[in-house]
Image (cartoon, grey):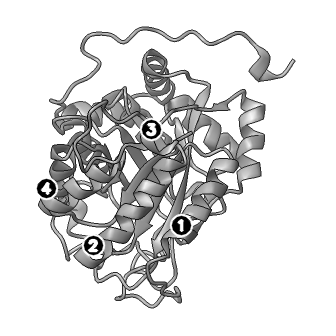
Amino acid sequence: MSPAATTAPAVFSPQQGDIRHDWSREEVETLFALPFNDLLFRAHSIHRRYFDPNQVQVSTLLSIKTGACPEDCAYCPQSTRYDTGLEVEKLMEVEKVLEQARAARESGATRFCMGAAWRSPKQRDMPYVVAMVKGVRELGLESCMTLGMLSADQAQELAAAGLDYYNHNLDTSPEFYGDIITTRTYQDRLETLARVREAGMKVCSGGIVGMGEQTGDRAGLLQQLANLPRHPESVPVNMLVRVQGTPLADEPDLDPFEFIRTIAVARILMPASHVRLSAGREEMNEQMHALAYFAGANSIFYGEKLLTTPNPGANRDMALFARLGIEPEQRHVERAPAAPHPQFYDASAQGAR
């Protein structure tokens, strides 16, 4: 009998006090310091209160505009400041993006994410971006975008188009942030997240580990996310992908157990959020993936490439899912209100499926 054919797992009810927004740094660091088995037991127990532990959200990420970014993020090959050999590509045509979205849907993705290497989008690009969002919604996929910093008006425009999620990562702790990025402040990032919330969109926000930070910095990142007025609905945890030409190209490997600890603590601090394995999965073996799923990771990016870096092949992910008894999570795009705002994109009226 295959693992998937066994009885449904026990999913326990949420408990009062699980969801908090007042974590101290000391409390978070204490979680990181727990014996590994104790930490995973606690994280997995909380995970079962909020999610089916044998389902993982499958998303696809497409780079809709590549390279030529003016920012100086030390990990990123898309910055104009580093010679990484990356070929610059202008904003993709809308129909080409939708072709990729259709292919993602056919391969099993339920969420389609689009990323553009901008400091912030120019107003002349917004009509094209809005058309992409509307088209993805028509396909019945959840939509997510990461376009850099947003003004309040741009956030409202994306929300009116029907964008489900906006991604804007904090990257690391406030204390370590200046060692990685100097062209925008931590407060800039927090303000964009606030504008996204005010516009009514869901938030996708996480960070990167393995950049030379200390455990306290990983604790600081997760503390910041958990103490937002509302937890991000999606929390991507990226492992640094070292790219020649960037300042972090020779950064030593992070201990894999520290990565798993970060996943587990994220799950404890944000019990109802999807915790996503993002960049760096190509370097993770099957055993590490399995530990991450047990620790509370329940979302992955699916496909051969993650923006500009390699990603495990879709067949590899599905084969591991089968061996572990994991199934892709099935989610439906939320319907628009019965009487939407005139500018709200009503996917249901456009034959979404």
Residue 210 visible in image: no
Circle 2 is placed at which residue position?
121
- Circle 3 residue: 348
Residue 43 point in image, percent of width and height: 44, 25
- 1 or 3: tag closer to the N-terminus: 1
Q: CA distance from mark 3 to mark 2?
A: 28 Å
Q: Nearer the viewer, mark 1 or mark 2?
A: 1
Q: Give me the residue at 56% from left, 23% from top.
A: 53
Number of other residues with Cα within 10 Å of mark 2, as a class: few under 14, some 14 to 19, many 20 or more: some
- Seen in the picture, residue 249 relative to 206 is either above or below; the reply is below
Which SS class for mark 3? Answer: helix
Q: Quadrant of the N terminus?
A: top right
What distance separates the C-alpha of mark 1 from that of mark 2?
A: 17 Å
- Mark 4 against mark 3, which lies toward the viewer? 3
Residue indicated by mark 4:
191
Q: Quadrant of residue 130?
A: bottom left
Q: CA distance from mark 1 to mark 3?
A: 21 Å
Q: Which residue is mark 1?
A: 97
Q: Position of residue 177 (x, y in %)?
A: 23, 63
Percent x, y of residue 196: 22, 50
What residue appears at the point 45 percent right and 91 percent down from the top-left corner?
Answer: 83
Q: Nearer the viewer, mark 3 or mark 2?
A: 3
